[in-house]
Image (cartoon, grey):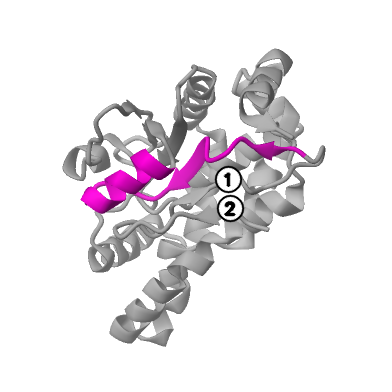
Amino acid sequence: MNSLKIALKNTTNTRSLSNLVNKDGKHIKQHLLIRSDALNKLDKEDIACLKNEYNLTRVIDLRCENEAYFKPDVKIKGVRYHTISILPNERLGMSKSGDKERDFNDFIESQKASGFASAKEFMVNIYHDLIKDSFSNAAYKKFLNVLLEPTAGATLWHCSAGKDRAGFATILILYILNFDWDLIVSDYLATNNFYASEVAKMLEVFGKDYEEILWCVFGVYPDYIDVIIETINSEYGSFDNYITNVLGFDEEKKAMLRNYYLEG
């Protein structure tokens, strides 16, 4: 079972985590936690859905400052907004403009400049740096602590495509909430289901020779999960050590998060 698709007209990867069941048979309270891609194109119907059906009260934007500045979230009345940039502006590869062809071409240029032979190697290196970088770790620490602040309704976090920066944020939350690792991985990889039609359209434009690059830009690979675990284990000893000692999320905070978001 994967997270529940929220059918908005102007997003691709918006999902509620409330239908997932953890190791203790508990699930996340109804639609309190939502992951998404960018919210810069929401229309009135999308806004009404998020407000009326999902009681959205908080949005956490994980994009770079430049992404958030040039493609700002559509603001919804009564919703509190936080900007927590996971990467600095100069870190290319994960950031997106919102224009798919431009994002594709920018990614190719970034890969060429990096010196990595393949798109996948380039992305694996980004994930490696994401775990080691003090800037990113400080941002994820702030993100987790914002989730402990009371709010009357749902919290939604997003980056541009809702797959890498928001994807790792979701991994952290589900791990702390005691979900099975296979379920966490399955939900992470489910992004590919939602972007399959987008990749198919782009393949018609750029051709099959660019399939791997397109999936690196718009999808995810199990290799990314592997490098997350390998880097965390080699740098910090274990996932638990990383969360406790690097992100500063101790047992008391973990218990608070579980009490706030879980039921059943």
**Amino acid at pointer 1:** Leu
Q: Compared with residue 69, is residue 115 higher up or lower down, i.e. above or below?
A: below
- Give the vertical position of 209 relative to 250 (above or below): below
Write the residue at 69% across / 45% down: 229
9 horizontally vs 208: left or right? left
Circle 2 packing at 10 Å, graded few (<14), some (14-19), many (20+), is: many
Residue 117 seen: no
Tag 2 residue: 3
Q: Hey, which quadrant is residue 102 in on the image?
A: bottom left
Extreme residue in the left direction: 70
Question: Circle 2 sits in a helix, a strand or a loop, which is it?
Answer: loop
Q: Is residue 241 magenta?
A: no
In which quadrant is the N terminus drawn? Answer: bottom right
Horizontally, is 60 left or right of 16 in the view?
left
Q: CA distance from mark 1 to mark 2?
A: 5 Å
Q: Which residues are magenta?
A: 26-53
Question: Residue drawn at (63%, 23%), measured in percent from left and top?
Answer: 257
Horizontal side of 51 relative to 127 (left or right) equals left
- Disc 1, SS: loop
Q: Residue furthest right?
A: 24
Residue 17 is labelled as 1
Residue at 30% x, 53% y: name it: 96
Q: Are marks 1 and 2 in contact (CB under 8 Å)?
A: yes
The residue at the point 74 percent across, 29 percent down is: 240
Amino acid type at circle 2 is Ser
Of the pair 144 and 255, the residue shown nearer to us: 255
In this rendering, does residue 4 appear at all?
yes
Quarter-of-image position of residue 54: top left
